[in-house]
Image (tube, helix red, strand yellow):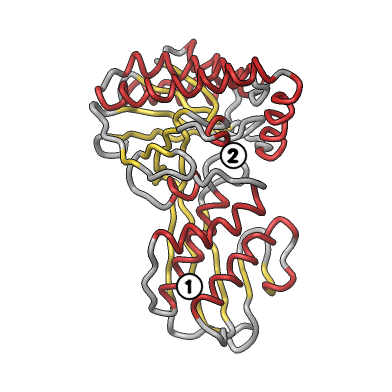
Amino acid sequence: MVQLSQKVALGKAHGKLILVGEHSVVYGKPAIALPFPLIEVKSFVEEIPESIRISCDYYDGYLSTVPNKMKGIAACVVETLKVLTPHPKGLLIRLESTIPLGRGLGSSAAVAIAIVRSLFTYYKRELNQKVLSSLVNISETHAHGNPSGIDMAAASGETPIWFQKDREIDQIQIGAPIHLVVADSGRVGDTLSAVSGVKEKYKTDQHKTNASMEHLEEITYTARTALSGGHLKILGHLLDLAQEELTSLGVSDDGINKLVHAARKAGALGAKLTGGGRGGCVIALAKNASHAKSLAKAFLIAGASKTWNFSLGNKLE
C-alpha cells in the first residue's frame, strides 16, 4: 500500500467547446471557443516514498510504464518537473475527470493543464500562461499531431475567446444570454483521422477545400458580430452553415448528422458538430432555458448518450 503524506496540491481545468472554426483553425483561420465549466479535471499531487506514479480511471502505475495513449501526459510531467526541480521526489499524481474522452471537449488539454497547475502548486511556484502553454503543448502534440492550441487556450480560460494560431487571443463579449445544449454521440471522435482527411482533400481538390476554409472563416467573423450583438437567430443560422461546410469536408458522419437533424426538428436555432468530428459531440443553440431542456430530450430520443445544458451571459442552468 502506498503511504500518502499530509501535503496535497490541487490543480483544475474545465472542458471546452468550439462554437465555430474547428478544422479551419488548423490552417490559420480564426475560431471561437467557449469554456465549458460543467465538466472538469482535477489533479491531486501528493508525496510518496518511491518513484512517480499516476492514478486515474484508465491507468494506475509508474510514470515510466504508462500506456501509449498516455505518453504525452508522461512527457508533460517529465518536462514540468525539469522546470520545477533538479531532484524530483516520489509523487503520486491522482486524476479525477468528468470530461468524456475523445469527444472534442478538450479532455487531453484539460488533463495536462490540471497536472501542470497541480505540480506548480505543489512546489509553490508561480505559473504564467506562456509557460503553461509550452508545457501543455508537449502533451497536445502527442494527442493531436499538430495542435492549433485552441483547446489549451479555451480550457485554461474563463471567457469566450477569439483564437487564431500564432496571434494574441482576444476575449469576446456576449450581447445577450445564449443557451447551448451539448449532446454526446457516445462515440469517440477521431481527430487525427479527421485532420488527416482534410489534409488529403487539399491534395485531391485544393480549390474546393480552399473555398470551404474561406467560407468557414467568413462564418466565424460574422458569428463574432452576431454573438457580440446578441443576434441569436443569425448566430444559429451561421452554426447551420458551418455544419454544411464541415460535412463537405468529410468530418461529419451519419451519427452526427442524425443528432443535428433531431435538434433542428425540435426547433434549435442552429446545430453543428463541435471539435474534430467523426464521432464526438454536437452543440445546438436553444431559444431559451426552457427550450434547451426540450432540445436535450430530443437529443436523447435520437440516440445521444448524454446531454448538458449550458448557458453563457447569465448563471448556469
Report which quarter residue 230 is drawn in.
top left
Residue 285, image x, y percentages: 40, 22
Seen at 49% across and 78% down, the residue is 84
Q: Which residue is mark 2?
A: 103
* Apparent side of residue 255 relative to residue 137 in the rendered image (left or right): right
Seen at 57% across and 80% down, the residue is 91
Report which quarter residue 255 is drawn in.
top right
Could you say which is closer to the camera, residue 84 or residue 314? 84
Could you say which is closer to the camera, residue 47 or residue 236? 236
Relative vertical location of residue 63 with respect to residue 188 in this rendering, above or below: below
Relative vertical location of residue 171 with respect to residue 297 in this rendering, above or below: below
For residue 36, the mark is none
Mark 2: amino acid: Arg
Give neighbour class at mark 2: few <14, some 14-19, many 20+ (Cα, 10 Å).
many
Q: Which residue is mark 1?
A: 119
Mark 1: amino acid: Leu
Image quarter hosting the N terminus: bottom right
Image quarter hosting the C terminus: top left
Decide which of tag 2 and tag 1 comes sooner along the chain. Answer: 2
Could you say which is closer to the camera, residue 273 or residue 308? 273
Give neighbour class at mark 1: few <14, some 14-19, many 20+ (Cα, 10 Å).
many
Residue 160, image x, y percentages: 35, 39
Find numbered disc 1 in the image and state the secondary structure of the residue it sits on. Answer: helix
Relative vertical location of residue 124 with respect to residue 42 in this rendering, above or below: below
Find numbered disc 2 in the image and state the secondary structure of the residue it sits on. Answer: loop
Relative vertical location of residue 211 with respect to residue 198 in this rendering, above or below: above
Residue 33, image x, y percentages: 43, 37
Seen at 48% across and 72% down, the residue is 119
* Apparent side of residue 192 relative to residue 280 in the rendered image (left or right): right
Residue 197, image x, y percentages: 72, 30
Q: How many marks?
A: 2
